[in-house]
Amino acid sequence: KQMVFIKFPITYHLSFSKITDREDKVLPEKETEEFLEQKLIVQEKFDGTNIGISFQNGDLMVQNRGSYLCLDDLDRLDEYKGFTKWINQRKDSLKATLTSSEILFIEWMYWEHTVKYDSLPDLGIGLDIYKKKNDKFLNTSRVKKILSGKVFTPEILYKGKITPEIIEELLNQNSSYSNQPREGLILRQDSRNYNIQRAKIVSDKFQISSTHWKSVPKTANICKYNINFYDL
């Protein structure tokens, strides 16, 4: 049976997000208003590299936004520095945790992109779990429960109906993992078991640069709890 590649979906900006580029998708104003009328869960948006992790017939599968990746090649790709050792340390526990129908999406945080993180709890941040047989993402509480003790998940900054004023207040706070402002926020509308919709907003303090982070001298982010992580 041929494997179907599941690409991590584009997250739309809220209509009043001030920082977007030409490739970004923006939720129309009416849809933004309807979205904000729902009870939402708000988490910090991380500025890293998206990686998908799953198991097919017991074999570890790793993917980026466009294709599956060969684990043996990742050590030679600077963008994924340290990931091979990180996943090998967690492979058995994740294999026992994720079903063959589930894909764990993480943000890989080794390199500083725009925000300099100096107190990360780990370099792999668990964001979402997609359930292929249901064609849905699990809700926030289920993701946290499944990954508890295995992969760090972002704290919940706010829960409930939210106003643009509260969003602005959260955006103006420093990152929970840096002394710099947050890059942005992820807002999620969840049902009892699944995620219904997600959207994002990026702080106007976060400048979209015409120079890609890969093309300038790179600086590693810093982990708060694992001083020797850079032996990876």
Image (cartoon, rainbow, N blue to C red):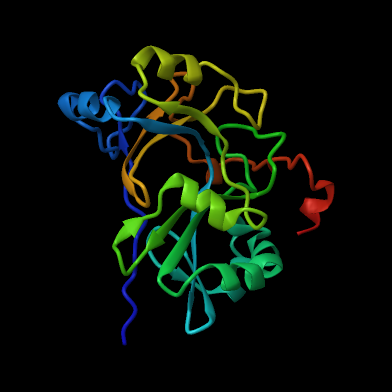
Q: x%, y% of residue 77?
A: 59, 62
Q: Is residue 54 left or right of residue 120?
A: left
In this view, the residue in front, 4 or 18, is 4
Q: Residue at x 58, y 46 (%)?
A: 153
In this view, the residue in front, 148 or 13, is 148
Which quadrant, please, contains the C terminus? bottom right
Q: Is residue 22 above or below residue 106?
A: above
Does residue 137 show up? yes
> In the figure, residue 160 lies in which quadrant?
top left
In this view, the residue in front, 76 or 228, is 228
Number of marks: 0
Q: Residue at x 78, y 52 (%)?
A: 229
Q: Residue at x 48, y 46 (%)?
A: 141
In this view, the residue in front, 224 or 69, is 224
Q: x%, y% of residue 164?
A: 35, 16
Most distant residue in the front direction? 192
Most distant residue in the right direction? 228
> In the figure, residue 2 lies in which quadrant?
bottom left
Which quadrant, please, contains the N terminus? bottom left
Q: Residue at x 59, y 58 (%)?
A: 80
Q: x%, y% of residue 114?
A: 55, 33
Q: Is residue 220 above or below residue 65?
A: above
Q: x%, y% of residue 82?
A: 68, 59
Most distant residue in the bottom direction? 1
Does residue 127 show up? no
